[in-house]
Image (cartoon, coloured by chain):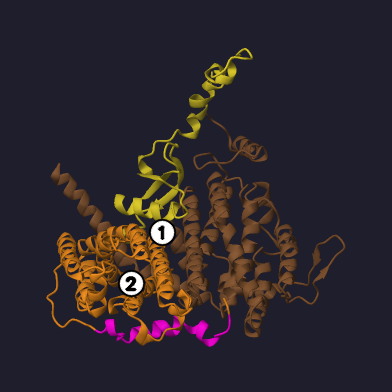
Chain colours: A orange, B yellow, C brown
Amino acid sequence: MKNSLFKYCLRLGDNSLILGHRLAEYCSNGPYLEEDISITNTSLDLIGQAEAILKYAAKVEGEGRTEDDLAYKRPEIEFYNVQLTEQPNGNFARITARQFFMDAFNFYLYSALKESTDNTISAIAAKSLKEVTYHLRRSSEWVIRLGDGTNESKIKMQEAINDFWRYTSEMFEMDEVDEELIAKGIAVDLKPIQDLWNKKVDEILAMATLIRPEDAYMATGSRKGYHTEYLGYILAEMQYLPRAYPTAKW
Amino acid sequence: MSKTDNQGPLWEVFTQKKPGLAFKHSGSVHAYDKNLAIEAARDLYTRRNEGTGLWVVKSENIIAVQSEDAESFFDPADDKIYRHPTFFEVPDGVKHM
Amino acid sequence: MSNTIEELEKQFQEKIDNEIKIEPKDWMPDDYRKNLIRQMSQHAHSEVIGMQPEGNWITRAPSLRAKKILLAKIQDEAGHGLYLYSAAETLGVSRDQFIQWLHEGKAKYSSIFNYPTLNWADMGAIGWLVDGAAIVNQVSLQKTSYGPYARAMVRICKEESFHQRQGFEIMAKMMAGTKEQQQMAQDALNRFWWPSLMMFGPHDSDSSRSSLALKWKIKRETNDTLRKRFIDKTIPQAEFIGLKVPDPDAVLQPDGSYKTGPIDWDEFWNVVKGNGPCNKQRLDHHKRAHDNGKWVREACIAFSEKQDKRKVIAN
């Protein structure tokens, strides 16, 4: 149970951390100043969520590690974020697509996790839900604007949706960790969340005059710590200082 | 300047610090439509808990007194001090007025 | 009303002398407007370009706390740029125009941002020294004569107060840390000290624009006055945590102030002219982001036009 809860927390925390990190990378690259500031807000929310949940993960593990140890000293194979979160920023449509897919997932996930029997998880979920509700509102609006904007923006938005589609089923994968925690009312069943997610995605894509891609080969692996090549570079940068100066405090 | 370089129209932002207080002008944002405007305003002007309420209005929709009209608009109020409560004498001892 | 220019100028100067703020719709001399446009846009560009040297370390911030703080700080800078552009726009120049002037090299930004950030202590040095120098200047500017500029400054000063502290905290932590951290901190101070002093601009005796800006109260205090204020409060802070400013001539005087060595103005003018280590990099980054955002801005315009049309049809 302890191991499962620890791993479950890492999944939640790593999703927020890696996505937040990617958005932080985009700072000073926004299409205009107001949007630069807004994206940074989302990034800050996500890193804050990661901090809270990794802190809890460290406590659950009980080995004396901190949230920073978990973020900065774990090897790649022990990261459990879905591969979608680590995909590079590329153009603004790609940032939007990645964000929208994750926001929709997080929105339904946290709505359900608010009822978790684990008090810490339920409290973090309640706080995160407020943030994610706003994130989803924004990313949905961007999908619609870019989809129904100019021809160029429509093409770019559709391409981004198509390219990232293969990374969207990983979010809903469940294994023995989920089974054990669902039975205790700590975790939630991801099947109904997938249905809600699908409905939301269909609704927004329709409003954006975009086409929902067919499911083809869908990427998998993050539940076991297998990632795309991109994560290694993220960690190489992110963990550089704590690993190069292991005794230093910052 | 080509239209495509446009940063969108200017909007004025008003925030309410606490419920019950008056809305106060905070500043402006550029935005292409009202949804983006209220979100940009939220992300810029309330990120330090400055607000419980938020208004945005397109700057072009604000009607201001032109400075050349200022004398005729505002100076006539100068000699009407009886509109202010401190103008009146209330005997010592009278309370709750 | 048929006021002559002379009368208008006299009334204008009277307002300034009586500390009455000038507002956008008020009459103002052309040169006052030009002077403001130059100074405010330079100030706005500095905030926005200033995002880059710190942005350079966001992905490498060594703790979650440090990452959040740095990100929030850079975001503040974007916000301050935005307040200043908005204030400058009240003078009748669009933000597009300001950006174009920046890209064409017609508008400047603070030279300090043309220096690279080479180690994590640079995040400390920037917060402590660069923001520290900026605050000295900005506190003074809260009383500037142009209303929208003064109001933007009040808001900025309120928000900036945490910036200098976070910078100093980084430095203090590193000075209390390992030998390598101490070396990084001293190295950062060595590189940022002189450019920070240059941020206040040329000496009063060499500053051509200063007298008019002071007469109009766009600037409230001279470059040298502000620079001295900064030096006098910063050297003791450095010493307090065991750092040494890279100025062999710096000596404490009986009155508590510091006498310092000569500033290398050749370096200053060289960087102003575009030859600093990062001038091209910073400007190219800004252009690239702006160009990459073009199709997004176009999409927003197209979408809002479609919405307007739909509204008309629906009615």
Q: Do badges 2 and 1 share one subunit?
A: no
Which residues, given as a range, are shown in magenta?
A: A221-248
- Looking at the image, which residue is at 60% across and 68% down? C167
Between residues C295 and C98, which one lies in front from this camera angle?
C295
Q: Position of residue A186 (x, y in %)?
A: 29, 68
Name the residue that disc number 1 marks.
C96
Q: Is residue C286 magenta?
A: no
The chain identifier of the residue carrying mark 2 reads: A
Q: Position of residue A34 (x, y in %)?
A: 40, 59
Q: Quadrant of residue C257?
A: bottom right
Say left or right for A138 vs C103: left
- Looking at the image, which residue is at 59% across and 75% down? C122
Q: Which tag is nearer the camera, tag 2 or tag 1?
A: 2
Name the residue that disc number 2 marks.
A12
- Look at the picture and state if A193 lies above or below C9: below
Secondary structure of the residue carrying tag 1 is: helix
Q: CA distance from mark 2 to mark 1?
A: 41 Å
Principal secondary structure, stretch drawn in magenta: helix
Q: Is residue B32 visible?
A: no
Mark 2 is on which residue type? Leu
- CA neighbours of label 1 inside 10 A, class few (<14), some (14 to 19), many (20+): some
Mark 1 is on which residue type? Asp
